[in-house]
Amino acid sequence: MSRVGAQPIPVPSGVEVAISGNEVSVKGPKGALQQRFDPDMILSEENGVVQVGRPTDQRQHRALHGLTRTLVANMIQGVNEGYVKTLELVGIGYRVHQSGKGVSLSVMLSHTVEVEAPPGIELTVEGTNIVRISGADKQAVGHVAAKMRSVRPPNAYTGKGIRYQGQQIKLKPGKSARRALE
């Protein structure tokens, strides 16, 4: 039996879960999410608890069991509390400005990079070098953060670039440091 898939998912107050076949809809204070899952998975809700079951112990069903349970739990947590990723811009001349619902990145390129917020995602700027990406959908928040980071990922030699807040960059020695070791 799966250790992750077998765990019940408690539904907090203020969150509504509707299960119809293999489709789950979740509504809460932060928004509403809807997702379709594999038809083999058995989804049920009783007394404010969502359970995920599987029909057999085949490898495919075991893999989908834990995945389905985690995705449903992420949906419930997202509409209740939401998800936040924080990016910081490190380097001289690296700045971010709020422009409507999106942000404008100045990261030592020949042009500024405009990043628009997709529906359900909110981009907020703190100071000149911190961006908070928040929303109810964990996958969408992570995707927007990764897309924004890919504009100028951290440099392995100088550490400059866009990084997740708290991310440690292991700096490589430069050319002159390498010669000193030989």
Image: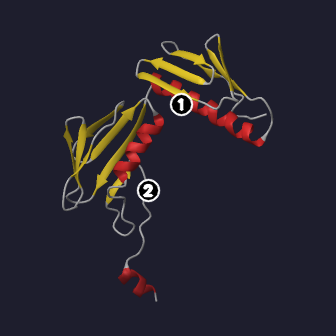
Q: Looking at the image, which is closer to me, 57 or 152?
A: 57
Q: Quadrant of residue 23?
A: top right
Residue with the mark numbered 2: 168
Q: At which x and y percent is residue 118?
A: 33, 36
Name the amino acid type tagged 1. Asn
Q: CA distance from mark 1 to mark 2?
A: 26 Å
- For the residue labelled by badge 2, is the local secondary structure a helix, a strand or a loop? loop
Q: Which residue position is annotated with label 1?
A: 74
10 relative to 139 in the view: left or right: right
Return the residue nearer the eye: 127 or 42: 42
Residue at left offset 40%, top offset 22%: 30
State the scheme by which the image is colored: secondary structure
Q: Are marks 1 and 2 in contact (CB under 8 Å)?
A: no
Determine which quarter of the picture holds residue 46: top right
Residue 42 lies, with reference to residue 91, above or below; the image says: above
Q: Quadrant of residue 59?
A: top right
Residue 77 lies, in percent from the top left, at 51, 26
Indicate the amino acid at tag 2. Answer: Gln
Q: Give the residue drawn at x 70%, y 30%.
A: 40
Label 1: state its secondary structure.
helix
